Structures are given as C-alpha cells and as structure tokens.
C-alpha cells in the first residue's frame, strides 16, 4: 500500500503520564502503530483505560507524545492541518449560554471559514443532523442526544477529511444510536475518513471497515471486518461412519475429529473442506446429523483480548 | 486576528451572561449610593467626598470583577472541557490566551465605562456640569485593571485551581498597590539582603499606585501631560510581558 492511501499514520506512539507528587511515569500508550485509510471508518475498541481517548488527545495536540509520531495527510499535525480535521469529544460540552446557531457560528469563525460562507455552512450542517427545530434553543436546554448532534455538527462544519469521534454512542438511546450510526456512515460516504472509539460492539460491526483492539495501551490486533464476516469454522455431526473415510477426513488441512458416544464431531476450517468431507462420508454410507457454521464474533475477539 | 476576536467576543458574551458580574455591579452602585449619603453628611466638601469615594469604588470593584471573571472563566473552560472543542479547531494556544484576555478587557471596559458615565451624569445633575476628571480617573483605573487581568490570565495558565490563581492575583494587586512602601527599604541604611530583595520586588512588581489618579484629581492636582501616555505605555508593556509568560506556560500545558 502506498503512503498516500493513508490519511492518518501513527507510528511508535507512546505516552507516559507522570504522577504529580512522585513524578513516577505510568505508560498509558505503548508504541502504537496505526493507519487510517482514506475513506474508511476505523473503530478503536478497548476497555476503559486502554488508551483510546489518550490516542485521540495526542492526535489533536492536547497531549504531547513521549515518543513516536503522527502524520496527517503525510505531514505532522499543526494548526493548519486542523482545518481539515473534525473532533467530537466524549460527552461534548459547549458554552451553555449560547444557542445552537451561536455555537456553530463561533466554531465556524474558529475554523477560519470565510464570513460569506458561514451561514450557508451552518444551515447545511443543522439540516444534516436534524436540528432545524432547535436552531435558536440554548445549548443548556438540549438533551444528551441533541447535544451529541450539535457535537457532530461542529465536527463536520469544516468539511473535514478526517473525523475523530470519541465514544459517539455513549449515553444515547437506541434511536440516538441509530441516528449517530447513520451520520457516521454518511460522513464516510461523503469521502471523509472516520476514526472512533466505542464500547458498543454491534454499532462497530455495523459501520466500521476495520477495527483495532487496544488494551493496556497496546494495539493487539487490527482486523478487516469484511474478512471475518463469514463463518470462522464448521462443525459436522456424523453417525455410522466406517473406518475407511476417517483417514481421508483427518488428512484435510485443519480438520479435527472428536468422538461423543455414537457420534463424531468433525471441525473443518472452510466450506470447500466441508464439501469434500460430505462426499467422503456419503461414500461410506455415513449419516450426517448436522452441519453448523460457527462464527467468532467481534465480541468474542474483544473478550479474548481483554481476558474476559 | 479574527479568531482572537471571535474568542474575545465569546468571552465577553459569557461574562455578560454571568450573574456574578451583576451582583458585584449592584454592590458597586450601592457603594456609590452610600457615598452620596455619607457625602451629604460630611463636614468637608460633599461633592469632593462623593467623587473620591465613588472613584475608589469603581476602581476597587473593577478589580474584583476582573479577578473573579478572569480566574473563573479560564478555570471553567478547563473543568467543563469546552477548551477541548476550541483547541481541536485551528486555534493556536496564544490565540486562545489573547482572546480570553481581550474578552475580559472588553468586559471590564464596558463595566468601567458604564459606571464612570453613570457617576458623571449623576454628579452633573448636582454640579450642573460633567466633570472630565471622572473619565480620566476611570480610564487610569481601567489601565490598572488591564494589568490585573493579565495577572489573572497568567496565574490561571500556571496553577490549576481558581482559588490559588485568585489568591496570587489579589496578592500581586495588593503588592502592586503598596510598592511605594518598598522605597523605605531602598535606602543605604537598610541591610544588603533586604535592600536587594526590595530592589528585586521593586523591579518586578507593577507600580499600581501610579494608576490611582482619582484622589489626586479630586483634590485639584494638575496632571503632567506625560502622565497618561506613561500609564498607557506602562500598562501595555507590563500586560504584554505577563501575557507572553502566560502563553509560554499555556503552550506547554497538557489537557488530560
């Protein structure tokens, strides 16, 4: 893959926090290597304290890395680069004395959006997140779900190339979560890249292209969800099979056979081997009681990484 | 500079919608009212008494407003994490610090101007003319407040709690108002250590006592033509130095 395929490249990113009193370092992020490709939605999964928020804060310059580097569009992130990055913090807080319109106007000014374009941009994002009715409502009067929409609106106001969402589904009801999923997919479909953290695995499975598992500050695995969408392995339960077929089935790559009473359970790694095994069993007049595809869910993988 | 202006206007808007501001303002107006009553009962010139007391009140409450707003507005940005939204935008740390300072200065200017004009109009009803010394003395107070705001922003950038930042700011204000007492320790009769300490403090602390023009003007003293330009230059230079330090500290600050 050429370098230009990645909008974000993180290499060797390490962060130590130091105790206020003893100044003793605690490593919260350990040599993180990660890429976010252009136009993809990347999910960063991990338990509390895994280092997800720290990663995002390092990307946005709220924290200084102890080691490592972060490249956005091939260059270190500076103030100018932030014109093309959107960010939604976990539990977004806004100036409560402002209305939705005033909040977005403030951020439009901070993004450096030309004055002549501001109102048009604000109208567009308000419509996109469905806040037309709340345009003049003060931020303090908004529910959690509506506040999150304001958060998304301010994050996409600058038409970013990369959007960073920290726990965007946190605290939302099912309707709010669905809307948030649609918004994230919409942002990706418009050509931007999205990186977000979440604990809600079904949402991650629904919208992410790739997922990274982060625990104890280390990236354990990155998987392409398209690669794990199919069955992980198949189980065949067989009766009355005579000895001649066993040898052939056992020779199939990755096959394993266990016996339980009169039945044999054959585990095979893919569909083509299942087809071969079925032919072998029928040849010897064996009886196939069931064929079950088994899936290793995202949750299984997640729990495996966190030791649950 | 448009980002600094946006941050400044937002800071002003936040301050104006802060109820604490109105509580302090109400108390300041009350003090001016009290001065009127006390002035009418005083033995000397009641108008001079009212002017003296009212100008002192404007100066003092202006400083209190500057400290309370200056320390709390930055702290609230940190505790409410609204700063994360702001700094995730293409906004440099120096722009944030300067925007906060400019917003607080704008608020203080509005407050001081309002109180000064109100006092001037009130006194013109009694005197039959608008006395310009009210405006001159209030302007000098505003310059002093500018330095106090710079201290508030500086300490807010350095220390974590608003209480500490407020205490340090008030401490510097009191010390700055008392710098003339350092003169006693600058003479040759004083020991070397004490004299050196006094010299250092004299060089570092702001000469806020120079900004107290109200008392001098009310008692008929004529100002040297260079006084106001000197005060403007002094306030701008001192505030700029403090803001530079504040930006230095704030730029290194991490937001966990």
Image: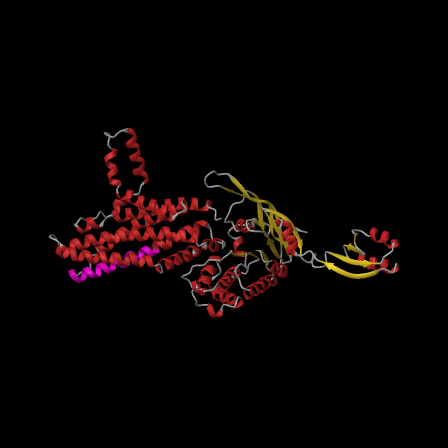
Q: Position of residue B164 (x, y in %)?
A: 36, 45
Answer whether residue B120 is magenta in the image: yes
- Per the rendered image, the range of residues in magenta is B106-126
Q: Quadrant of residue A183?
A: bottom right
Answer whether residue B142 is magenta in the image: no
Q: Nearer the viewer, residue A12 or A159?
A: A12
Q: Nearer the viewer, residue B205 or B70?
A: B70
Please state the total of marks drawn on the protein image.
0
Task: Say whether residue B207 is visible.
Answer: no
Q: Position of residue B18 (x, y in %)?
A: 35, 59
Q: Is residue A123 above or below residue B57?
A: below
Q: Is residue B45 left or right of residue A213?
A: left
Q: Is residue B100 left or right of residue B127?
A: right
Q: Nearer the viewer, residue A113 or B165?
A: B165
Q: Nearer the viewer, residue B215 or A299?
A: A299
Q: Residue furthest front?
A: A261
Q: Position of residue B137 (x, y in %)?
A: 24, 52
Q: Who's the residue at 62% across and 56% down the image? A: A38
Q: Residue furthest left?
A: B43
Q: Is residue A177 left or right of residue A230?
A: left
Colour scheme employed for the rendering of this structure: secondary structure
Task: Say whether residue A286 is visible.
Answer: yes
Query: Chief secondary structure of the magenta span?
Result: helix
Q: Position of residue A267 (x, y in %)?
A: 77, 54
Instruction: Give the position of the N terminus of chain B as an image quadrant.
Output: bottom left
Q: Quadrant of residue A299?
A: bottom right
Q: Who's the residue at 54% across and 51% down the image? A: A53
Q: Is residue A253 left or right of residue B126?
A: right
């Amino acid at each position: 893959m050429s370098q230009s395929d990645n909008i974000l490249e993180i290499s060797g990113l390490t962060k130590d926090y130091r105790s206020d009193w003893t100044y003793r370092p605690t490593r919260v992020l350990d040599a993180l290597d990660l890429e976010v490709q252009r136009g993809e939605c990347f999910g960063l999964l991990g338990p509390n304290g895994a280092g997800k928020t720290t990663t995002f804060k390092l990307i946005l310059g709220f924290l200084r890395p102890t080691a490592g580097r972060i490249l956005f569009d091939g260059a270190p992130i500076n103030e100018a680069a932030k014109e093309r990055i959107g960010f939604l913090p976990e539990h977004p807080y806004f100036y409560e004395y402002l209305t939705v319109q005033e909040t977005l106007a403030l951020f439009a000014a901070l993004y450096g959006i030309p004055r002549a374009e501001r109102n048009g941009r604000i109208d567009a994002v308000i419509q996109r997140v469905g806040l037309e009715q709340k345009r003049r409502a003060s931020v303090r009067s908004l529910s959690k779900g509506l506040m999150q929409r304001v958060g998304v609106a301010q994050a996409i106001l600058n038409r970013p190339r990369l959007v960073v969402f920290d726990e965007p589904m946190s605290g939302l009801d099912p309707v709010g979560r669905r809307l948030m999923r649609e918004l994230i997919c919409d942002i990706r479909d418009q050509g931007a890249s999205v990186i977000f953290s979440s604990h809600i695995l079904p949402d991650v499975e629904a919208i992410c292209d790739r997922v990274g598992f982060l625990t104890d500050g280390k990236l354990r695995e990155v998987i392409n969800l398209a690669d794990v969408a199919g069955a992980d392995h198949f189980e065949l339960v067989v009766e009355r099979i005579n000895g001649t077929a066993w040898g052939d089935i056992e020779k199939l790559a990755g096959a394993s056979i266990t016996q339980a009473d009169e039945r044999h359970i054959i585990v095979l790694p893919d569909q083509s081997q299942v087809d071969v095994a079925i032919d072998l069993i029928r040849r010897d007049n064996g009886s196939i009681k069931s064929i079950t595809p088994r899936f290793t869910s995202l949750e299984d993988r997640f729990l495996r990484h966190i030791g649950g | 500079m448009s980002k600094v202006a946006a941050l400044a206007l937002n800071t002003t808007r936040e301050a104006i919608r802060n109820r604490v501001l109105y509580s302090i303002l109400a108390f300041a107006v009350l003090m001016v009212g009290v001065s009127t009553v006390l002035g009418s009962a005083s033995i000397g010139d009641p108008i001079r008494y009212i002017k003296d007391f009212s100008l002192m009140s404007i100066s003092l409450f202006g400083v209190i407003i500057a400290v309370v707003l200056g320390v709390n507005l930055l702290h609230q940005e940190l505790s409410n994490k609204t700063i994360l939204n702001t700094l995730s935008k293409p906004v440099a740390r120096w722009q944030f610090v300067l925007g906060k300072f400019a917003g607080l200065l704008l608020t203080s200017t509005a407050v001081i101007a309002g109180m000064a004009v109100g006092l001037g109009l009130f006194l013109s009803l009694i005197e039959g003319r608008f006395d310009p010394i009210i405006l001159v003395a209030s302007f000098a107070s505003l310059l002093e407040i500018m330095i106090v705001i710079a201290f508030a922003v500086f300490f807010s950038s350095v220390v974590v709690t608003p209480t500490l930042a407020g205490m340090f700011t008030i401490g510097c204000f009191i010390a700055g108002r008392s710098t003339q007492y350092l003169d006693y320790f600058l003479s040759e009769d004083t020991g070397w250590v004490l004299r050196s300490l006094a010299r250092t403090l004299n060089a570092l602390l702001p000469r806020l006592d120079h900004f107290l023009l109200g008392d001098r003007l009310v008692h008929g003293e004529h100002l040297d033509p260079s006084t106001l330009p000197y005060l403007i230059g002094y306030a701008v230079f001192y505030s700029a130095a403090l803001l530079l330090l504040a930006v230095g500290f704030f730029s290194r600050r991490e937001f966990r």
